[in-house]
Image: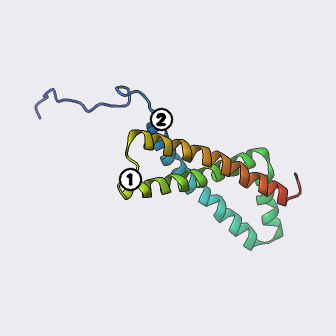
Amino acid sequence: MPNKKRPLSPHLQVYRLGFQMVLSGLHRIAGMALGLGTLIMVWWAMALASGAEAYAVFEGVMVHPLGRLVLFGFTFSLIYHGLNGIRHLVWDTGRGFEKEAVKASGLLVVALTVLLTVAVWVFAYMQAGKI
């Protein structure tokens, strides 16, 4: 096969990392995190079905600070991926492609994600009587 010099497509080092690129990457990472988080939900269901001892092990892992961090990340991923999915559904209607609208909707998704994630955790701690 002849070795011809062919043009290369631009890669990440050519572009400046923009806000929308970060949001797109975060959407993909959140989707992968949700896939892994599903394994935690399966573990929870199996522990629940297996009896008190198995559930105590699960609960012990999840109440550890590292377990809570994982659950917080799962909550964040679920909310971000859902809200950003709604944003994409709006785009599927052909609306919101103006530069200002894209940035505003991205900022709205991030702000609502942070707000709703904190609200879910505050509500959970209130229900547990820890607040």
Q: Is 90 in front, or is 38?
A: 90
Tell me what residue is drawn at x 64 percent, y 52 percent: 74
**What is the residue that sits farthest to the left in this orientation?**
2
Left-right relation of 106 to 1: right
Q: Is 116 in front, or is 128?
A: 116
Picture disc at residue 95 = 1
How crowded pointer 1 is (Cα within 10 Å; few <14, some 14-19, many 20+) is rated as few
Q: Which amino acid does label 2 sit on?
A: Phe
Q: What element carries label 2?
A: helix
How crowded pointer 2 is (Cα within 10 Å; few <14, some 14-19, many 20+) is rated as few
Tell me what residue is drawn at x 83 percent, y 60 percent: 127
Q: Please state the horizontal and vertical placement of residue 100, each as a whole percent of the image.
A: 43, 39
Question: How far is disc 1 from disc 2 in space, using C-alphas?
Answer: 19 Å
Left-right relation of 90 to 116: left
Which quadrant is the N terminus positioned in?
A: top left
Asked if disc 1 and disc 2 are in contact, CB closer than 8 Å, the reply is no
The answer to which quarter of the image holds residue 55 is: bottom right
Q: Please state the horizontal and vertical placement of residue 94, each as a whole percent of the image.
A: 35, 55
Q: Please state the horizontal and vertical placement of residue 93, each as a whole percent of the image.
A: 37, 59
Q: Which amino acid does label 1 sit on?
A: Arg
Tell me what residue is drawn at x 47 percent, y 35 percent: 19
Quick check: 46 above or below 101? below
Dot 1 or dot 2, earlier in sequence: 2
Tell me what residue is drawn at x 78 percent, y 52 percent: 122
Q: Mark 2 points at which residue?
A: 19
Quick check: 50 above or below 113? below
Q: Report if residue 122 is visible in the image.
A: yes
